[in-house]
Image: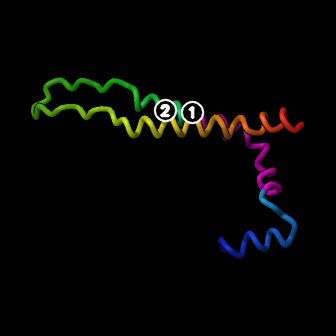
């Protein structure tokens, strides 16, 4: 399906842009969901861990995952670029 499907759609005159145009009405919902999930990711990545009273094992808290934070920042930048792309393209070519 992944190889034949796009060929059949192209033969019928339905390209990727035409297919994506159907989702334009859902753009505000996708935008809100994307930024809500990014906000939750930043909150989880940068919150202070709770102190557990009476921790018998004496375990240390895990240190912040720098790689995970870096990936979160990259994902946020990509999301902002993808979100702004239609507006930038319209301004340049419109």
Element carrying mark 2: helix
Q: Nearer the viewer, residue 25 or 14?
A: 14
For this orientation, the residue located farthest to the front is 92
Does 9 appear above or below 28? below
In magenta stretch: residue 33: yes
Q: CA distance from mark 2 to mark 1?
A: 6 Å
In magenta stretch: residue 19: yes
Question: Which mark identifies residue 73?
Answer: none
Image quarter of the N terminus: bottom right
For the record, the magenta segment spans 17-35
Residue to which mark 1 is pinned: 36
Residue at left 50%, top 34%? Answer: 73
Residue at left 27%, top 32%? Answer: 63
Does 48 appear above or below 14? above
Q: Position of residue 12 (x, y in %)?
A: 86, 70
Q: Position of residue 89 (x, y in %)?
A: 80, 38
Side of 64 where 43 appears, left or right: right
Side of 28 where 33 appears, left or right: left
Element carrying mark 1: helix
Q: Position of residue 51 (x, y in %)?
A: 24, 23
Image quarter of the C terminus: top right
For this orientation, the residue located farthest to the right is 94
Whether residues under marks 2 and 1 lie with C-beta atoms below 8 angstroms apart, the answer is: yes
Residue to which mark 2 is pinned: 40
């Amino acid at each position: 399906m992944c190889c034949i499907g796009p060929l059949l759609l192209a033969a019928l005159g339905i390209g990727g842009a035409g297919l994506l145009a159907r989702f334009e009405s859902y753009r505000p919902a996708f935008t809100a969901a994307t930024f809500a999930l990014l906000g939750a990711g930043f909150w989880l990545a940068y919150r202070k861990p709770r102190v557990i009273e009476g921790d018998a094992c004496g375990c240390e808290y895990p240190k912040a995952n720098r790689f995970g934070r870096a990936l979160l920042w990259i994902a946020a930048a990509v999301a902002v670029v993808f979100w702004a792309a239609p507006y930038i393209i319209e301004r340049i070519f419109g």
